[in-house]
Image (cartoon, helix red, strand yellow):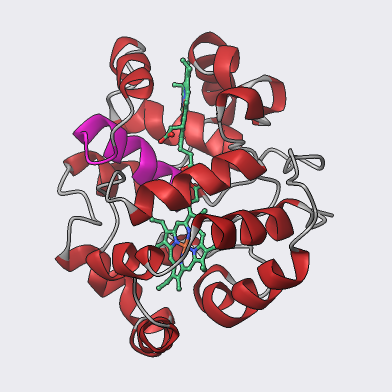
Amino acid sequence: MLTKLFRVMILACCGWGCIGAQAASSGGMPPDVYLGSALGKRPDETRGQKIFQQHCLQCHQAGAVGLPAQKIPALAGQQYEYLIKQVVDFLDQERSNAIMHQQLMRSGLNNATSIADVVGYVANLPMNPAPEQGPGNQLEQGKHIYEGFCASCHGRTAEGNGDLWVPNLRGQHYSYLVEQMQRMARAQRGNISEDLHRMFTSYTDTEFQSVADYLSRWSVQ
Ligand code: HEC
Ligand code: HEC
């Protein structure tokens, strides 16, 4: 268990400036050629919509709003660069999830043009206005944690920052957010920097629940 002081140190040395460098120097930035190539493309959203309907809709649902009962995330309105990195990480097996791997490989999505097209489509959809929420009993604690230890990277309104691979946390389902934080703490999401992993190990499950609940109630308007 790490201390509060450690969290402050992480924030102090991992502000806006150094995340990109961290990602580049750790397992965070995939070495895969698709990443740079996909980022450099101008997405064809019409083609992306077709790919989405054929290969992603069944799980991520119409409008890419996700399916909380199965911990399937909303993708709508997520940061473009972050999504590209996640898809490439799935393909590289840097981020493990068997279902996603199978789908992505089978769909013929493993080329930069298709990745850019489908991600361009979902990133421009409106965020989910009614994500699954938590029980609502620890919102003050969630606010305190978010403002003190998360907002410096994810932004004051949790909008994220595409240039630094930081995801938007609004319009996202409570149980998905909790599960991902637990995975990052337990080193089950291999595509993050060591510093980020260590920061997440300093929280309890109850703290994850409180901050996820707080985030899930944020208006996306
Ligand atoms: C069989 C169900 C299924 C299908 C089909 C599917 N996904 Fe997923 N997707 C998931 C699940 C489950 C997760 C959560 C993975 C995890 O827990 O790490 C996920 C996560 C993601 C993420 C990470 C989101 C984040 O916030 O980090 C992206 C990006 C993604 N999917 C894109 C796609 C795309 C693009 C397609 C279509 C080519 C697709 N998915 C098809 C089930 C699916
Ligand atoms: C040093 C910057 C930094 C800090 C501080 C930080 N994060 Fe993050 N967070 C990131 C980055 C970068 C990612 C994306 C990692 C990747 O590429 O998979 C991320 C990913 C996440 C995800 C996964 C989202 C998804 O769609 O799968 C959640 C949830 C999250 N952070 C919540 C938090 C919370 C809550 C806090 C505060 C306790 C926090 N983060 C503090 C940088 C940060």
Q: Would you say residue 91 sits in the magenta stretch?
A: yes
Q: Please state, as top left, top right, bottom left or bottom right, where the N terminus lies in the image.
A: bottom left
Viewer-proximal residue, 184 or 66?
184
Q: Please state, as top left, top right, bottom left or bottom right, where the C terminus lies in the image.
A: bottom right
Q: Residue at x 46, y 42 (%)?
A: 42
Q: Would you say residue 45 sits in the magenta stretch?
A: no
Q: Residue at x 54, y 47 (%)?
A: 178
Q: Position of residue 168 (x, y in %)?
A: 58, 56
- Bounds of the magenta segment: 81-95
User: Is there any visible trace of residue 77 in the rendered image?
Assistant: yes
For residue 188, above or below residue 147: above
Q: Position of residue 187 (x, y in %)?
A: 27, 50
* Horizontal side of residue 29 vs 2, given as left or right: left
Q: Position of residue 161 (x, y in %)?
A: 51, 65
For residue 66, above or below residue 217: above
Q: Position of residue 146 (x, y in %)?
A: 62, 72
Q: Residue at x 46, y 46 (%)?
A: 180
